[in-house]
Image: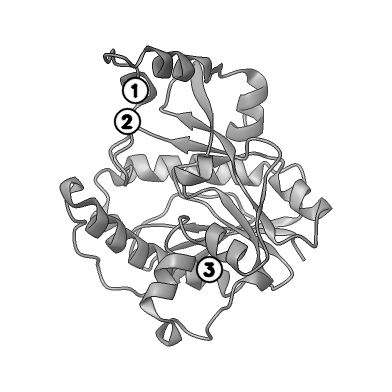
């Protein structure tokens, strides 16, 4: 049995501004997962039955769902309603993927435009009896050929940030048997599980290395995240904050390309 199962929920293509670009990102995400240094992993891509998908590495499974075409996302000016719509759709897809995960596995939801460290499966395999981990340290990447930004509190920003032992998840037998709030909080969002597990006495620990890369600044980023250099705008009395941001910049070295992008 694999130690770590990745679940990638794919939004319906009708709600994606640039589907070919999104699918190129998915291929990069899949390659990043498939480059794990341990073979103790599986990956489940969950997509609508009618959404066209690109070629993916052979070990990656595709799970198709019959879901109605989603309504357009609420505008950015109404972020809470926008996030609720995203959580409801994402939750259904993540739940469908997790249903096939064995209870002695760890599970990690991966957004289809992010990248992960190739050390995750080996780390999970070496620590089989923990509640799981949150990615406290990770990179922000906007497509630059030379730079990324390394920051803490990564799990507050990015959905690709929680590794949870599957036996900590209470899974109803069917989607219809699940309360909508439970669906959104446990499967549709990364904002709640860490706190809920801590309240249950099984807190997640910080992952001891940068676990993922959050792609920012592209057309289908659901949180409208800004490209890295756009965050460096002069503001009065914010010189120290700008210096802290500059200190977080990292060169995109061959080692980092190998660990996260699956290429030298």
Question: Given this view, does label 1 or label 3 mark the residue nearer the observer?
Answer: 1
Asked whether, in this view, residue 227 is left or right of residue 136, the answer is: left
Q: Earlier in the sequence, mark 3 or mark 2?
A: 3
Q: Are marks 1 and 2 in contact (CB under 8 Å)?
A: yes
**Could you tell me which quadrant the N terminus lies in?**
bottom right
Residue 236 location, x and y as percent?
26, 13
Query: Which of 194/61 is in front?
Result: 194
Q: Secondary structure at mark 2?
A: loop
Q: Eyeballing the image, is 166 above or below 237? A: below
Q: Are marks 3 and 2 in contact (CB under 8 Å)?
A: no
Where in the figure is residue 169, as x and y percent of width and height?
A: 60, 72
Q: Secondary structure at mark 3?
A: helix
User: In front: mark 3 or mark 2?
Assistant: 2
Crowd band around label 3 with a 10 angstrom C-alpha radius: few (<14), some (14–19), many (20+):
many
Count residues near mark 2 (Cα–Cα under 10 Å), then give few for <14, some for 14-19, many for 20+.
Answer: some
Kindly check if marks 1 and 3 are in contact, taking CB atoms under 8 A apart as contact.
no
**Residue 93 drawn above or below residue 219:** below
Mark 1 neighbour density, 10 Å: few (under 14) some (14–19) many (20 or more)? few
The residue at which mark 2 appears reads as 226
Mark-to-mark CA distance, 1 and 2:
7 Å
Q: Residue at x 40, y 68 (%)?
A: 184
Residue at numbered disc 3: 97
Sequence order check, earlier mark of 1 and 3: 3
- Mark found first going from the N terminus, 1 or 2: 2
The residue to which callout 1 is attached is 231
For residue 259, which numbered disc appears in the image?
A: none
Q: Is residue 119 left or right of residue 164?
A: right
- Label 1 or label 2, whichever lies nearer to me, is 1
């Amino acid at each position: 049995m694999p130690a770590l199962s990745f679940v990638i929920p794919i939004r319906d293509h009708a709600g994606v501004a640039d589907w070919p670009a999104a699918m190129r990102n998915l291929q990069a995400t899949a390659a990043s997962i498939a480059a794990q240094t341990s073979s103790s992993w599986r990956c489940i891509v969950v997509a609508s039955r009618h959404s066209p998908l690109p070629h993916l590495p052979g070990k990656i499974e595709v799970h198709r769902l019959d879901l109605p075409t989603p309504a357009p996302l609420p505008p950015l000016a109404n972020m809470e309603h926008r996030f609720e719509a995203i959580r409801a759709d994402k939750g259904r897809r993540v739940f469908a993927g997790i249903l096939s995960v064995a209870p002695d596995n760890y599970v990690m939801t991966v957004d289809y435009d992010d990248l992960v460290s190739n050390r995750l499966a080996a780390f999970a395999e070496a620590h089989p009896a923990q509640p799981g981990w949150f990615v406290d340290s990770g990179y922000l990447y906007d497509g630059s050929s030379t730079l990324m930004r390394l920051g803490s509190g990564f799990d507050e920003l990015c959905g690709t940030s929680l590794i949870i032992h599957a036996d900590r998840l209470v899974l109803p037998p069917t989607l219809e048997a699940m309360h909508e709030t439970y669906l959104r909080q446990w499967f549709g969002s990364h904002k709640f599980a860490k706190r809920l597990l801590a309240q249950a006495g099984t807190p997640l620990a910080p992952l001891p290395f940068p676990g993922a890369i959050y792609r920012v600044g592209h057309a289908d980023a659901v949180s409208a995240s800004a490209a890295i250099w756009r965050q460096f705008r002069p503001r009065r009395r914010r010189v120290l904050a700008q210096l802290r941001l500059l200190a977080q910049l990292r060169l995109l070295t061959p080692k980092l390309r190998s660990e996260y992008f699956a290429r030298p």
